Image (cartoon, rainbow, N blue to C red):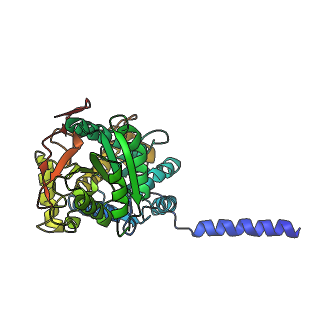
Amino acid sequence: MRHTRMLCWIATAAVALAGCAQVHEPVDDYIVLGMDEDSTGPGASYSTIAGSTVRATVARINAAGGINGKEVRLVVENDESSPTNTPSVIRKLVDQGASAIILSTGSGSALQAKQISQSTGIVTIAPTALTDTVAGPPGNEFAYMAPNPLAQYADVYCGAFEAQGRKRLGVIADSSPAISGILNTLDPRLRKCIDIVGTQKAAVDAADLTAGVSRLLDSDPDVVLVASVGGNFELLAQNTVHRLAPDLQRFSLASIGNQPASWKLAQPGALDGLVYMGSLSADNRRTAELQNWLRTVKGPGYSLTAYDAQAYDSVMLLARAIELAGTHTDPHLLNRAMQEIRDVPASFGQSPLTLSFSPDKHIAPDSACGLVLIEFGSDNTPAGPWSEYQPQCSNKGAQR
């Protein structure tokens, strides 16, 4: 009898606690968008750039009358780019009534979020993640991403290596979960076109990379790829390679090009000749229009980044889906509407780039020309598109 009463008390307490939890279904009066923004972890250097543009875009939408005449409210949580934190963060956003979630966090966390989006039935879109599996099968019914996938990064790098006759690649990488996930995708694809003679990894907050870079140079690479989330690690790697092997051709991910504040940390001429995987092109008028608008928000001297453009497009794609669905309270209708989005002109990439989704395509760019190889000049600022190789605006490859 005592055992039965105790079980009843436990059950009653559980019901009471559940009743006290602040769980909110989407309401009809306004639209809640959630954002998982890493503002303090290893991905903060790029996540906060995207996050500030998400906020500005939501404010712009509201100033124009909202979506379907309804105000948009943004709720934000921080997972510190830690995949172990991501499930609770996503659930918090769902509990606050989010109809969809923007993943302004690392690729590892965005990949973890895919599982939660599937179990909760909530649309997620990643404006900065690069790992293809973030929005690829299996379990991707509600998961989407805005940038070009790493498979296309690898194709473009391979084209660039072939154009220069490079045969031996050395890799310098930070040990963040985001970069580990990126290398897991890039590595096997790059090995199909070049011999990877060595990989050196170090902590994101490393203070000296001399020993690791020296070991890498001992393997005699004829080209180096720096893979990092950016910030101090990226500049430390670039400074060190330039100091020890100034004539060695270097490539990088998008991070270095999208973090203008970090260029001043480079030693004089240390970035000269560095080629990074960019996503902005001077021939795209929508990019220029976005920069002009953001300068009214972030200051007249603001330099647009791909994170800005992809964050802006991510919010606008969600807005388009809500408009098409005619509702934000039915997750299945909203998801179906996401898969009906076709041929939306992109704010990033080369001018012909469009963005589309379908039941079988959850990565937005319709071609590889969302990518642009950009070369740094002697003044440690981007000088423009690299003349030796560029992706084509088709899914058939790239052009020299």
Residue 78: in sight, yes or no? yes
Name the foreground residue: 132 vs 266.
266
Q: Is residue 71 above or below residue 328?
A: below
Residue 349 coordinates in the image, percent (x, y): 20, 45
Q: Quadrant of residue 144?
A: top left
Name the foreground residue: 313 vs 197.
197
Q: Is residue 17 above or below residue 238?
A: below
Seen at 14% across and 64% down, the residue is 295
Residue 88 coordinates in the image, percent (x, y): 51, 62
Give the side of residue 156 with respect to residue 198, left or right.
left
Residue 310 coordinates in the image, percent (x, y): 26, 52
Seen at 20% across and 45% down, the residue is 372
Residue 334 coordinates in the image, percent (x, y): 39, 45
Residue 32: in sight, yes or no? no
Numbered marks: total: 0
Seen at 21% across and 67% down, the residue is 261
Q: Is residue 280 above or below residue 209?
A: above
Give the side of residue 238 with respect to residue 325, left or right.
left
Q: Quadrant of residue 158?
A: top left
Name the foreground residue: 108 vs 352.
108
**For the C terminus, which image quadrant?**
top left
Name the foreground residue: 278 vs 134.
278
Residue that extends furthest to the top in the rendered view of this protein: 396
Residue that extends furthest to the right in the rendered view of this protein: 1
Give the side of residue 186 with respect to residue 387, left or right.
right
**For the N terminus, which image quadrant?**
bottom right
